[in-house]
Each structure stands twice: as C-alpha cells, then as structure tokens.
Image (cartoon, grey):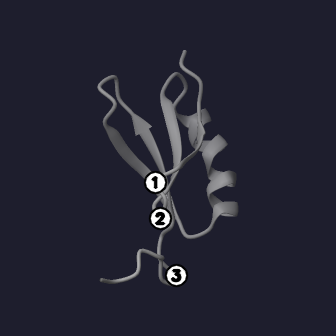
Amino acid sequence: MGSAKSAPGEYRYDILMEDADGRNLRLESTRDLDSAWKRFPALAAQYPGARLVLRSRETKDILARTEDN
C-alpha cells in the first residue's frame, strides 16, 4: 500500500465552513500550517456567524474551529 504522507507541494490543510447538518464546504486549501493560520482569521471575518474549521488533510485532526454564534 502507498504512504499516507503528503508529497512536497501538496495541499495539506483545509479551511472549511460547516453547515447546520455538519457537512463541510472547502473554502481554501494551503500547503503549510503557517499560511493556514494566517488565512483562518481572515476567512472567519469574511463569514461572520459561520462555523469555520481548520483541518489537516493528513491526520483529519481539527486544528482550530470558530465559536458558534
């Protein structure tokens, strides 16, 4: 079986918007965590009241989530 690790240059992090049913709409993908951390608050400000999630593609871990309003 192939490795689950990301290849260099691959998108590794997704910023998603969760809907009321828990489904996710991908807003952006980044290659590195630093870029994701920079974009996350900007996108949260762009979509006030929406729940945004920053997730690792590799581990599927949620690294950040905006609060419910």
Q: Residue at x 45, y 61 (%)?
A: 57
C-alpha gap between disc 2 and disc 3: 14 Å
Percent across and percent down for residue 2 are 34, 83
Badge 1 crowding class, 10 Å Cα cut-off, few under 14, some 14 to 19, many 20 or more, is few
Q: Residue at x 47, y 76 (%)?
A: 5
In the depicted view, which residue is nearer to us: 58 or 25? 58
C-alpha gap between disc 1 and disc 3: 18 Å
Badge 2 crowding class, 10 Å Cα cut-off, few under 14, some 14 to 19, many 20 or more, is few
Q: Residue at x 48, y 70 (%)?
A: 11
Q: Secondary structure at mark 1?
A: loop
Q: Secondary structure at mark 3?
A: loop
Badge 3 crowding class, 10 Å Cα cut-off, few under 14, some 14 to 19, many 20 or more, is few
Disc number placed over residue 60 in the picture, else none: 1
Q: Quadrant of residue 65?
A: top right
The correct choice, above or below, for 50 with respect to 1 in the image is: above
Q: Amino acid at mark 3?
A: Gly
Residue beneath disc 3: 9
In the depicted view, which residue is nearer to us: 51 or 59? 59
Percent across and percent down for residue 1 are 30, 83
In the depicted view, which residue is nearer to us: 26 or 63? 63
Q: Amino acid at mark 2?
A: Glu
Q: Secondary structure at mark 2?
A: loop
Left or right of 4, for residue 45: right
Residue contact between numbered discs 2 and 1, judged by CB atoms under 8 Å: yes
Earlier-in-chain disc, 2 versus 3: 3
Q: Quadrant of residue 35?
A: bottom right
Residue contact between numbered discs 1 and 3, judged by CB atoms under 8 Å: no
Residue beneath disc 2: 58
Instruction: State which mark lies toward you, 2 or 3.
Output: 2
